[in-house]
């Protein structure tokens, strides 16, 4: 269900961008495998440059691997999400897929305008963008507050400078212990000729 929804959305975006379909058309019939944690989708490029589901026996020419944590770590930042994605396989198709992913945009206003009208669609899109940005700022502030709480007030997390000082101290104790061992061995050797 999720894969079909995502595939429908991807084809909706491709339908609105002739340049993207044109770039994908030379690769018609070649397979893609999208992997995000336990979710795997096998796709094939159609002759018109859109995508369709493929069966599992289809050998993909390219694999797109997205670490699951990248979905929440990116915070909705498209560039960060694309940067976290690894492309493996045929270089020419991987390069084309990467280019299409970086440049394909969803113009939500264009989809809402026929239903709501131009002004309402623009206001709704701008309001949604502000709402999403506000949520991202709140999530980031919450994460920072949580890290501060667990590192300063209830020290469950060691701060970087504290860890560096501890490591330095451990190194100094190890050096002193080594010097002491050498001194003891030297004195023992002198006593027992």
Image: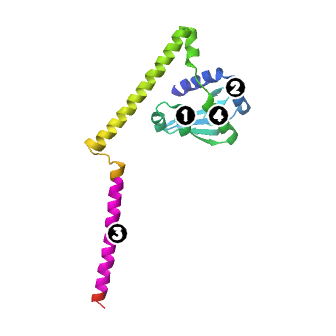
Q: Secondary structure at mark 3?
A: helix
**Quadrant (top left/top right/bottom left/bottom right) for the C terminus:** bottom left
Looking at the image, can residue 53 be seen? no
SS state under label 1 = helix
Task: Specify which label sits upstream in the sequence, 4 or 3.
Answer: 4
Residue behind mark 1? 79
Residue drawn at x 64%, y 24% is: 14
Q: Residue furthest bottom?
A: 193
Q: CA distance from mark 1 to mark 2?
A: 20 Å
Query: Which mark is on residue 175?
Result: 3
Callout in the foreground (1, 3): 3
Q: Is residue 71 shown to the viewer in this render?
A: yes
Judged by its main secondary structure, the magenta piece is helix
| Side of 146 relative to 136 (left or right) | left
Q: Is residue 136 left or right of residue 12?
A: left
Residue 137: x and y in percent read 41, 29
User: 85 and 179: which one is in front?
Assistant: 179
Q: Nearer the viewer, mark 1 or mark 2?
A: 1
Estimate how packed mark 3 is, as few (under 14), some (14 to 19) or many (20 or more) residues with alpha carbons within 10 Å. Answer: few
Q: Earlier in the sequence, mark 1 or mark 3?
A: 1
Region of the chain picked out in magenta, as a range: 163-189
Residue 85: image location, x then y, percent: 55, 38
For marks 1 and 4, the one nearer the N-term is 1
Numbered tag placed on residue 99 in the rendering: 4
């Amino acid at each position: 269900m999720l894969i079909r929804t995502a595939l429908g959305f991807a084809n909706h975006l491709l339908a609105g961008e002739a340049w993207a379909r044109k770039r994908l058309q030379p690769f018609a019939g070649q397979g893609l495998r999208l992997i995000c944690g336990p979710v795997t989708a096998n796709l094939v490029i159609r002759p018109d440059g859109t995508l369709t589901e493929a069966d599992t026996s289809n050998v993909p020419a390219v694999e797109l691997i997205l670490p699951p944590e990248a979905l929440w770590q990116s915070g909705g930042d498209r560039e960060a999400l694309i940067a976290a994605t690894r492309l493996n396989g045929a270089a020419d198709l991987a390069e084309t897929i990467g280019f299409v992913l970086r440049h394909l945009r969803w113009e939500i206003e264009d989809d809402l305008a026929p239903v709501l009208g131009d002004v309402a669609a623009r206001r709704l899109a701008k309001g949604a963008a502000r709402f999403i940005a506000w949520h991202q700022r709140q999530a980031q502030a919450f994460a920072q507050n949580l890290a501060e709480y667990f590192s300063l007030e209830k020290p469950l997390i060691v701060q970087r400078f504290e860890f560096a000082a501890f490591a330095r101290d451990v190194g100094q104790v190890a050096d002193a212990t080594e010097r002491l061992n050498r001194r003891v061995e030297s004195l023992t050797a002198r006593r027992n000729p």
